Amino acid sequence: MNLFGRDFLKLLDYTPEEILYLIDLAAELKEKKKNGVLTDVLRGRNIALIFEKTSTRTRCAFEVAAHDLGMGSTYLNPNDSQIGKKESIADTARVLAGMFDGIEYRGFDQEIVETIAKYSKVPVWNGLTNEFHPTQMLADALTIKEHFGKLSGIHLVYMGDARYNTGNSLMVLCAKLGMHFTAVSNKKYFPSEELVKTCQEIAVQTGAVIDFSEDPLEGTKGADVIYTDIWVSMGEPDEVWEERIKDLEPYRVTMDIMNNAGEKCVFMHCLPSFHDLNTGIGKDIKNKYGLDEMEVTDEVFESDRSIVFEEAENRMHTIKAVMYATLKEA
Ligand code: CP
Ligand code: NVA
């Protein structure tokens, strides 16, 4: 498999074989790291990390992975660079591509990261846009594979806002890898018809199943994985909280939902999560709307059915695999 020089902008651009290759490569790099085997094969290279939205996992994963591979990294945000104020994204891409060997972008429209890729002569990696979060998907797939020993045939249920980056990307992941994806939500929050159609076409080739339910009990029955994300994403206005809470409260992941799914079912979340409403914005929401629980109960999040921290660690190993595969000459 040769992915040298490729961008990593969305899973739709990758074949199932290429996605599985990246997951296996990540597992191999993880094993090496655990055994203290160095993988600094990209010594002397440098990467740029553009973050127009905040991050803990993705930024740290790129930085640690880059350093493990022997590379230097530079973090840029709109507050202390010219990005988005004095310089177009096309010019930024050409400037950075002249100095760096790869560029990560986290921000708003998918079109922006596609534009950076168009103007950049070095690989560009999507660290989250409004529409897609492809590096998260590799970590999720690796975590599921580690837990269940396989991906094909696994039934993943996504509860909550399924028409945003994480929900959209999970549907694509499941379609590509022959998994069963069910979005369980108020139908206002189902992915766009266009993306559903694309995924259904892929599913015909891969044996995947894509379906939808507005019934939390019926929709989660027999699930292997129940996955959720915060109800209001980065960049969305505060005004949407009220409607979101009203629409999505029936789709909170509770222990009853986990038990309804079955004993083998595990809980996943890309994080950050509002399972603890006593911190930061969570506290404001709790006070304003009188909510005690948000997208997932603390009980589920802290239970032994929750594999969220394994999933978070896998962000680093999978991002390392993407950089390794796209920057290392075969
Ligand atoms: N899951 C994820 O992308 O987390 P960060 O926002 O912390 O990067
Ligand atoms: N949907 C979330 C994902 C965070 C990793 C957001 O865009 O804020």
Image (tube, rainbow, N blue to C red):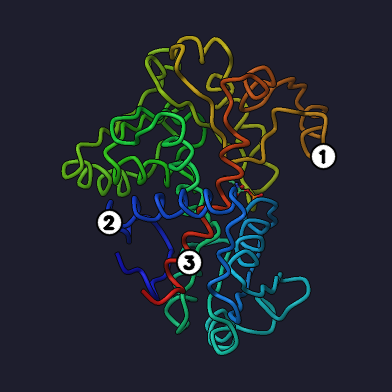
Q: Which residue is mark 2?
A: 15
Q: Position of residue 111 (x, y in %)?
A: 46, 67
Residue 280 in which image quadrant: top right
Q: Residue at x 53, y 22 (%)?
A: 251
Q: Amino acid at mark 3?
A: Tyr
Q: Amino acid at mark 1?
A: Gly
Q: Which residue is mark 3?
A: 324
Pointer 2 local density, CA inside 10 Å: few below 14, some 14–19, many at least 20: few
Pick whichever of labels 2 and 1 is earlier in the sequence. Answer: 2
Q: Secondary structure at mark 2?
A: loop
Q: Residue at x 66, y 60 (%)?
A: 64
Q: Position of residue 95 (x, y in %)?
A: 59, 88
Q: Position of residue 71 (x, y in %)?
A: 62, 73
Q: Which residue is mark 1?
A: 280
Pick whichever of labels 2 and 3 is earlier in the sequence. Answer: 2
Pick whichever of labels 3 and 1 is earlier in the sequence. Answer: 1
Pointer 1 local density, CA inside 10 Å: few below 14, some 14–19, many at least 20: few
- Are circles 3 and 1 on residues that touch, CB within 8 Å? no
Q: From where the camera sits, is residue 132 visible?
A: no
